[in-house]
């Protein structure tokens, strides 16, 4: 999230984290652009009127550089002309302030789904099964305990990482592949 209003940025970030979304916050355009270039985000929530580098410039640069992140402009510029300009710059969605938080969550979710191929609700790798809809996992017949945080991490990381693994290697649970190790969930203490 690139937003110069620190109080609003923190409130939105806390709310999105409660929805099991990983969130980074940048409070000015220069820092936001650097993070957007250095990281592979699914969705970038971008204010337009930012200090340092204007949000319009950030959007144009990311689109011109082929950034695959989806861009949602969340801004006080609320006229139809502003919306048309923002979408014309390459933003994927536009939400004027003030906004309803559930609408923001739904729009981010919709953009994130389009950022990557659709993920089936039940993921399998070897004898590890993760049911993302019910937030349950098991290895063989043994159920695995998932905290809200770990279920969100598995749901976000597993599909892309496992799909990229070479066919003969095994996903090691840390987002990387290993040719000699099988998936080993951490043990509860």
Image: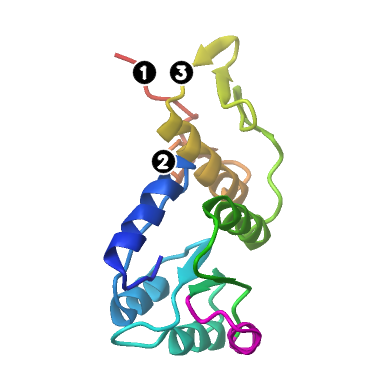
Ranked by sequence position, the earlier of labels 3 and 2 is: 3
Q: Residue 108 has which mark? A: none
x, y percentage for residue 134? 62, 25
x, y percentage for residue 75? 48, 75
How far apart, in angstroms, are the residues tagged by discs 1 and 2?
Answer: 14 Å
The residue that label 2 is drawn on is 174
Question: What secondary structure is marked by label 2?
Answer: loop
| 102 sits left or right of 189 in the view | right
- Which segment is the magenta one? 76-89
The residue that label 1 is drawn on is 187
Quick check: 73 above or below 121?
Answer: below
Q: Residue 145 has which mark? A: 3
Q: Are marks 1 and 2 in contact (CB under 8 Å)?
A: no
Question: What secondary structure is marked by label 1?
Answer: loop
Q: Taken as a whole, is the magenta stretch helix, strand or loop?
A: helix
* Residue sitting at x 29%, y 87%: 52
Ranked by sequence position, the earlier of labels 3 and 1 is: 3
How far apart, in angstroms, are the residues tagged by discs 3 and 2?
Answer: 17 Å
| 122 sits left or right of 77 in the view | right
The answer to whether any part of residue 171 appears in the image is no
Magenta region includes residue 82: yes
């Amino acid at each position: 999230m690139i937003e110069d209003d620190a109080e609003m940025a923190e409130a939105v970030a806390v709310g999105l984290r409660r929805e099991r979304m990983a969130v980074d916050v940048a409070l000015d355009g220069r820092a936001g652009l650097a993070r957007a270039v250095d990281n592979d985000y699914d969705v970038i929530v971008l204010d337009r009127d930012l200090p340092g580098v204007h949000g319009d410039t950030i959007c144009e640069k990311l689109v011109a550089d082929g950034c695959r992140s989806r861009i949602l402009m969340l801004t006080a510029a609320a006229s139809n002309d502003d919306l048309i300009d923002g979408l014309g710059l390459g933003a994927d969605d536009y939400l004027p302030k003030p906004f309803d938080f559930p609408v923001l969550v739904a729009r981010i979710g919709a953009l994130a789904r389009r950022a990557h191929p659709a993920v089936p609700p039940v993921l399998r790798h070897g004898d590890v099964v993760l049911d993302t809809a019910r937030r349950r996992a098991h290895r063989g017949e043994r159920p695995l305990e998932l905290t809200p945080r770990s279920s969100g991490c598995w749901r976000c990381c597993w599909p892309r990482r496992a799909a990229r693994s070479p066919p003969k290697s095994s996903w090691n649970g840390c987002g990387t592949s290993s040719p000699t190790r099988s998936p080993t969930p951490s043990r509860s203490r």
